[in-house]
Image (tube, rainbow, N blue to C red):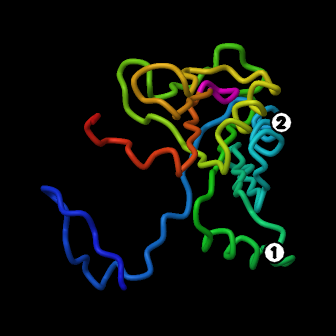
C-alpha cells in the first residue's frame, strides 16, 4: 500500500514528479557557544556529529548532528563524508558565528517570544517517563512538563540558547487532536 496524504485546503494531492527524491535534510539553529551546544545535544540527546564545516573567510562553522545508529558508517574521505551528510534525513545543523561565545550581548531569538515565528524541534522517545527522569537528572529547564497544561504527555525543554525542544512518546499521542469523549 502506498502512502496517501491527508486532504486539507491547500494540499496538493499529487505532487509533481519534478520533486521526486526531495528529502528534508536538516534544520538549522544558530548557537552562541558550540562547545556548550555540542555537549548538550551529544550528551543529553545522544546525537553524533556527522560533519563539521569551517568557513574562515566568513568566520562561521557548521556542525551537522544526527541521532545516528551504530550501523551507520560515514565515509572517511572529507568530500565523500560531506556529500553523504547532505544525503541523510533528520539532521540538526548548529551554526556558530565565530566570536559570539565571548560576546555577552549576543542572544538569539528562540521564535517563541514576540514576534513569534519558528517554534521548536522535537525528539520522539521510546519511554516518556524515562526520558523525563533523564532530563531532570541533567537539570534541563522546562517550558512545560508532560503533566502540565491541557496537552498531556508532551514536554518542552530549552537548549542552551533558549530554543524549545518538544519531547513526545508516539504511542501516547494516539488521541492527540481528537475531541475529548
Judge whether 69 appears above or below 98 on screen.
below
Quadrant assignment for the N terminus? bottom left
Looking at the rendered structure, which numbered label has been put on residue 154? none
Locate residue 104: give its quadrant: top right
Tag count: 2
Task: Look at the image and say whether residue 91 sits in the magenta stretch.
Answer: no
User: Residue under circle 1?
Assistant: 71
Q: Nearer the viewer, residue 118 or 157?
A: 157
Neighbour class for label 1 at 10 Å: few (<14), some, many (≥20)? few
Mark 1 element type: loop
Quadrant assignment for the C terminus? top left
Locate residue 95: give its quadrant: top right
Q: Nearer the viewer, residue 47 or 55?
A: 47
Is there a contact, CB below 8 Å, between mark 1 and mark 2?
A: no
User: Residue under circle 2?
Assistant: 35
User: What is the spatial separation of the Cα atoms under label 1 and label 2, in whole angstroms?
Assistant: 26 Å
Judge whether 132 appears above or below 16 on screen.
above
Q: What range is drawn magenta here? A: 158-162
Judge whether 28 appears above or below 8 on screen.
above
Question: In the displayed structure, does residue 71 sit left or right of residue 65?
Answer: right
Mark 2 element type: helix
Amino acid at each position: 500500500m502506498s502512502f496517501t496524504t491527508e486532504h486539507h485546503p491547500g494540499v496538493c494531492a499529487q505532487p509533481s514528479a519534478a520533486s521526486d527524491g526531495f528529502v528534508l535534510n536538516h534544520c538549522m539553529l544558530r548557537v552562541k557557544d558550540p562547545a556548550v551546544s555540542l555537549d548538550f545535544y551529544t550528551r543529553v540527546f545522544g546525537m553524533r556529529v556527522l560533519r563539521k564545516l569551517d568557513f574562515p573567510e566568513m568566520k562561521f562553522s557548521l556542525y551537522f548532528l544526527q541521532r545516528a545508529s551504530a550501523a551507520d558508517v560515514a565515509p572517511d574521505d572529507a568530500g565523500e563524508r560531506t556529500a553523504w551528510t547532505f544525503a541523510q534525513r533528520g539532521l540538526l545543523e548548529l551554526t556558530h558565528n565565530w566570536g559570539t561565545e565571548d560576546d555577552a550581548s549576543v542572544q538569539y531569538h528562540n521564535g517563541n517570544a514576540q514576534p513569534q515565528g519558528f517554534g521548536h524541534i522535537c525528539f520522539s522517545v521510546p519511554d516518556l517517563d524515562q526520558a523525563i527522569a533523564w532530563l531532570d537528572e541533567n537539570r534541563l529547564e522546562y517550558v512545560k512538563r508532560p503533566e502540565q497544561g491541557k496537552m498531556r504527555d508532551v514536554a518542552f525543554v530549552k537548549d542552551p540558547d533558549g530554543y524549545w525542544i518538544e519531547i513526545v512518546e508516539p504511542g501516547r499521542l494516539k488521541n492527540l487532536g481528537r475531541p475529548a469523549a
